[in-house]
Image (spheres, coloured by chain):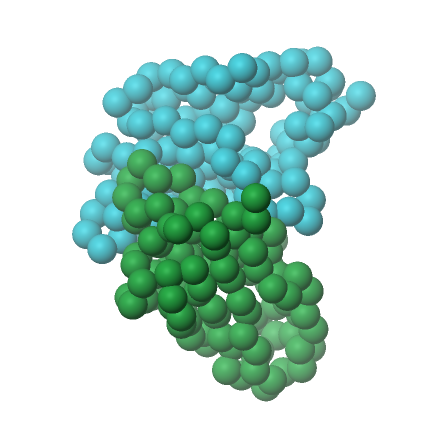
Amino acid sequence: NAGVTQTPKFQVLKTGQSMTLQCAQDMNHNSMYWYRQDPGMGLRLIYYSASEGTTDKGEVPNGYNVSRLNKREFSLRLESAAPSQTSVYFCASTPEGGRNQPQHFGDGTRLSIL
Amino acid sequence: GEDVEQSLFLSVREGDSSVINCTYTDSSSTYLYWYKQEPGAGLQLLTYIFSNMDMKQDQRLTVLLNKKDKHLSLRIADTQTGDSAIYFCAESLNYGGSQGNLIFGKGTKLSVKP
């Protein structure tokens, strides 16, 4: 049971480089989310996609773009990486964006910007 | 805006009970979640409760909700070393296009000493 799969698991970038973080889920979920986790900050929502074809900004969208490629895949792109974007990034999904739908998380991508 | 607060650290001895506390701000009916994060892993859903309930029990886990005080607690009975992890409290938003989005606390790091 794969669930939510994130690639890569680790990445080191130089300031100014671009990168796309990939996320795929095999649970036929409609809603998908990207979070970043920083020490002492908990998880903060970057972008979310309530359904295929829609995306919306979360709490901390600046410096990121997303693409909901199809129902399974939701990618996060850093166009010009900055050291402040060093973080652990988590993708999550839920059947519908409803209040009684727990989110299922991937194992994360650990990203360092030098 | 909505906020979720929880203490950052808790240390207990193996076999004792652990109680992790959380406060939230949304005054409307909502779902409240507890997630567990082990080192290097993603978030694993432990349990959740709807705000019209006072208590939910699931094996060693007991969730208590005081809606008047907006206070949520997670009690782990007979705590084991394998329970050492970070525990996140999360509140489900209850309005508009953000319905179902989660607001996370900063996480409580539980250390279990043998």
| Front one among A60 and A90 | A90
Number of numbered callouts drawn: 0
| Residue B32 vertical placement versus A97 (above, below) | above
State the residue at coordinates (19%, 52%). B96
Q: Which chain is green?
A: A
Quadrant position of residue B32:
top left
Q: Is residue A11 left or right of residue B96?
A: right
State the residue at coordinates (39%, 51%). A28
Quadrant position of residue B91:
top left
Q: Which chain is cyan?
A: B
- At which x and y percent is residue A11? 68, 70
Q: Is residue A39 left or right of residue A49?
A: right
State the residue at coordinates (65%, 36%). B85
Q: Is residue B49 left or right of residue B97?
A: right
Is residue A56 at least partly visible in the picture? no
Q: Is residue A83 left or right of residue B66?
A: right
| Front one among A59 and A66 | A66
State the residue at coordinates (31%, 36%). A100
- At which x and y percent is residue A38? 57, 56
| Residue B15 vertical placement versus B35 (above, below) | above
| Front one among A101 and B107 | A101
| Residue A27 vertical placement versus A32 (above, below) | above
Quadrant position of residue B18:
top right
- At which x and y percent is residue A95? 35, 46
Q: Residue furthest left?
A: B96
Q: Residue furthest right?
A: B114
- At which x and y percent is residue B37? 60, 41
